Image (cartoon, helix red, strand yellow):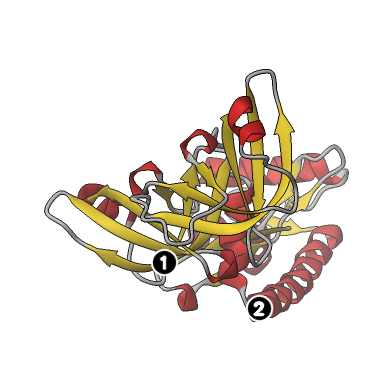
Amino acid sequence: MKEESMSEENASELQLHGTLWLTAQGGQHLGGPDRIALLAAIATHGSITQAAKAVKMSYKAAWDAVETMNNLAGEPLVARLAGGKGGGGTRLTERGAALVEQFRRLEEAHRRFVEQLGRQPGLADDLHLLQALNMKTSARNQFLGKVESVIHGAVNDEVVLGIVGGQRIVAIITHDSTVSLGLAPGVAAFALVKASSVIVATETAGAKLSARNQLAGVIDRVTPGAVNAEVTIALPGGGTIAATVTKDSAAGMGLVAGMPATALFKASSVIVGRPG
């Protein structure tokens, strides 16, 4: 059984679809809706030629499918009839007829199951999250959210992305990138920020800073290395952001877990993408 998701630009139009198929011992493909439809057509027409036409399949492809199903099922699902005009016809065996009936029942149960899944709240958000979890990137910081606003410029655009905890990340990307990604308010997107692009500040009150992004939180841990240290800042809402600073800077600033800190990075350091 396989469920497939089809996403539209508008998340409210997201629908869930699925396909049911059967596998024989060893994982070999026995049949799905197309092959079951062929068996049902054979039962109706009593002729593999007419059945193939009914399901829009070539005569050879129909016989190949029948022979494959007969072999994999361990017993014939379709049998030839001797005599008659044109040398006889074909019919379903008792096992073949039972398989068609059973598949129809399973298909109806599967349809109801998929419909029930499709009515679950938050389907679109969960789909985007699963796609983001499968994403592989070298950027240490990955944030999933939704576009809140887009300000278009002649060359570059400003994209504001709302992330976990109600915070926002501002990115400056080319106008062509905005168009090709289909970025607009309400669209799910992710922001990537390298740890080396993040500056850690412990005192920003009253300071005037050129960095557009300023995410305030509390230092969760400091992991020292031979030259650099990785500083992880816990953000409101459960998110985190990592920064790479020199070992001397970490020591000089007295960075330790539990200390309030702010992660600073330029809007031009943010890479924006779309899930899936």
2 vs 1, front mark: 1
Foreground pick, 17 / 231: 231
Foreground pick, 173 / 181: 173
* Residue under the image location 80 percent in, 39 percent down: 71
Q: In terms of sequence position, does the residue under pointer 2 or pointer 1 come before the other?
A: 2
- Horizontally, residue 153 falls left or right of residue 88, namely left
Which corner quadrant of the image does residue 213 belong to?
bottom left
| Residue 21, numbered label | none
Residue highlighted by disc 1: 187
* Residue under the image location 58 percent in, 65 percent down: 164
Image coords of residue 104 (percent x, y): 73, 71
Q: Is residue 113 above or below residue 226?
A: below
Res. 45 in view: no
| Residue 115, numbered label | 2
The type of residue carrying mark 1 is: Val
* Residue under the image location 46 percent in, 37 percent down: 197
Image coords of residue 242 (percent x, y): 61, 43
- Horizontally, residue 73 falls left or right of residue 83, namely right
Q: Is the Cβ of the residue at disc 2 closer than 8 Å to that at disc 1?
A: no
**Quarter holding the N terminus?**
bottom right
Foreground pick, 65 / 90: 65
The type of residue carrying mark 2 is: Glu
Which structural element holds mark 1?
loop
Res. 187 in view: yes
Label 2 neighbourhood size at 10 Å, few (<14), some (14-19), many (20+)? some
